[in-house]
Amino acid sequence: MFDTLITGGSVLDGTGAQAYLADIAIRADRIVAIGRFSQAPAHRRVDVAGLTVAPGFIDIHTHSDYTLLADGRADSQVCQGVTTEVIGQCGFSCAPLRAGAGGRGLIGYVELGMAIDWASFGEYLDRLTQARPALNVAAFVGHGAIHRAVMGDEAGAPDEDDISAMVRLAEQAFDDGAMGLSTGLEYWPGNDAPLQEIAALTDVAARRSGLYATHVRNRDVYYDLGFTEAIATARHAGARLQISHIQPKFGAPAQAMQHTLELLYRAGSEGVDVAFDIIPHDWSHTVMVSVLPAWAREGGTARTLERLKNPALRERMKHNPTPIWRLVTAGRWDDIVLLRSLVNADLVGRSLADIGRQRGVDPFDAVLDLLLEEGEGMPEVMWTSRSFADADLCMCLRENGCMVMSDTLALTQRGPLKGSIGSLSGYGWTARLLGHYVRERGILSLPDAVARITSRPAERLGLADRGRLRTGAFADIVAFDPAAVHDRSSFLMPLQHPAGFEQVWVNGVPVVQDGLRNDEQPGRVLRG
C-alpha cells in the first residue's frame, strides 16, 4: 500500500536524460518505486497524464533568511515548483550576531517587531526550524555577518586576533550546520575587507568541505580583477567555488562574458572546482544604500544618516569611484527603478529619472533624499536596473557549468509579508526559464533546463537524496505543463504567480494541488 501514487506523467528524472512515461509511488517522505503500476493500491492517487513530472526545483541562491522567519509559507517559491532554497548569500546571513545587534542591514529584512533572540548560527537554524518553512532550506554563513560580529560597523583592517576570531566563528557555523560560506565583495563590509581576511575564511570552507559562493568585487569596468580574485582565493584554499550571478553588468567591455568564461575554463583545467549561476532576467536588483562609498557606511546606519544631512559629504558620495552600478555614473536614470520603500511606497515602480523630475532635483540627489527619508529603514530600500545583457544570459545558459537561481526572497501575499517584493522575477523565475528561454527561444532543451535547477545544484551542495527522481530519494516533486508554463509577473504587477504548475510535493506532502496552494508547511532545515 502506497501513501501516494502519481500516475501517467512524463518523467524527467533531473539528470538531463529524456523523459519517459512512468508512475511514481511515495511512502511517507520518500519515493519508493518508479515504474508502471497504476493499478497498485494507494491511499491517494493523482493523475498527471499530459504533465511533466520532475524533481522539485532547487534555488541555489536566495535571501530569504529573514522572510522565512516572518512567514514560512513561501508561496512565491512553491507555487512555481521550488522545494529547496539556499539562503545566506552575498555575505549576508542572520547569524552569527554581535551582542545587541538587530536584523537591520540584512537583505530581505522586514520591520515586523520580531524578537532577534539568537546569536550563534546554530541558534538561528533552530529558530528557522521552529518557523516550519514550507520548503527545505539550506544555509550558508555570510562573511559580512562574521565580520560585523567581530568588528561591528567600524572601519579599519582587522588584526591577527580579529581574523582568528572570525575563523572561530566560521568554524562554529559549519559545526552548527552551515553548508557553505558566502561573500558579498561589492557590499559593506566585504568591499572594505582585505584579501587576507577573505582567504582565511575561504580556508575554513575548504577544510569543512563547504561550498564557497561569492558575489565578486566588480562585474563591470574591472570585471576581470573580481573574477580572478575569486579564482585565486579558491585555488589557494582548495575550496569549491560558486560564482554568484556571474553576468557582467552595464559598463563592462563587450568581450567580458566570453573572457570570464575563458577564465573559468582555464581555472578548471588547472584543478579549480568552479561553477556559476545566473538570474534568468536582464534586470538586476539590490539595496539602494549600496550606491554609497564604503566610507559613508562606516559606523552603521545612524552615522550614515548624519552624513546624508551634510551637503559637502553628500557631494563626495556622488563621486564614488566604484559604484554598484555604472548606470549611475553614466546618468542612465531611466533604467533604474525604485523597487521597495516603506516611507515612499507611492514612488515604487517609478524610475529615478521620473522621481527626480517630480521633485525638481538631480536624480542622484533624489536617491540620497530617499535614503535619508527612510531613516533607520534605509538598509531595506531596494531598486532595480536594466544592468544585464540578454546575449550574456544566453551564452551562460549554453554552458554546462551554469545553474539558474532567483536571487530573491520567499514571500507570500498572506499575513505579515503581504505587499513585500524581493525582485521583478521573484514570483516567476522558473517559469521564465522554462517558458521564455526553453519553449519560446529554444536556448536549451527542457531536460537540460530542469537539470540546471535540480540535480546540478543538488550535486554542488552535496544533497545526495534530492534533485533527482529515483527510488530512495526524498519525495520533492513538481508536475507542470511545459506548454502552459508562463511567467505572469510584470514590471507593474510583479507579485503574480505563474501559470502551468499543477502539483507540488515537499517531503511527500502536497503543497500545491491542481494549481492551488494549500496551507501545508512540510519543509526541513538541511544542515551540513
Image: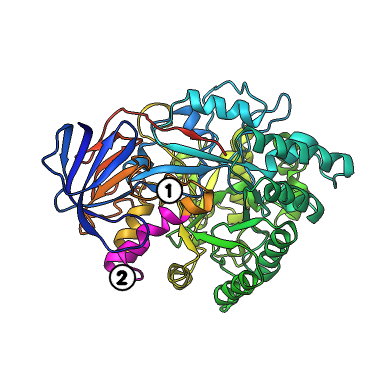
Q: Is residue 32 left or right of residue 224?
A: left
Residue at left offset 72%, top offset 38%: 171
Residue 314 in view (yes/no): no
Residue 58's disc number: 1
Other-residue count near label 1 (Cα within 10 Å), few / some / many at <14 / 14–19 / ≥20? many
Task: Please identify, in this view, whether the residue under mark 2 or under mark 1 is nearer the observer.
Answer: 1
Circle 2 is placed at which residue position?
441
Residue reaching furthest left? 39
Could you tell me residue 226's position as x and y percent? 68, 64
Part of the protein shown in magenta = 437-456
Residue 126 in view (yes/no): yes
Looking at the rendered structure, the secondary structure element under dot 1 is strand
Could you tell me residue 209's position as x and y percent? 64, 48
Q: Main secondary structure of the magenta part?
A: helix
266 and 319: which one is in front? 266
Residue 131 magenta-highlighted: no
State which quadrant residue 185 falls in: bottom right
Could you tell me residue 464's position as x and y percent? 46, 47
504 and 76: which one is in front? 504
Residue at left offset 50%, top offset 27%: 129
State which quadrant residue 186 falls in: bottom right
Looking at the rendered structure, the secondary structure element under dot 2 is loop
487 and 74: which one is in front? 74
On the rendered image, what quadrant is the C terminus found in? top right
Residue at left offset 59%, top offset 62%: 274
- Upstream in sequence: badge 2 or badge 1: 1
What kind of residue is marked 2? Arg
On the rendered image, what quadrant is the N terminus found in? top left
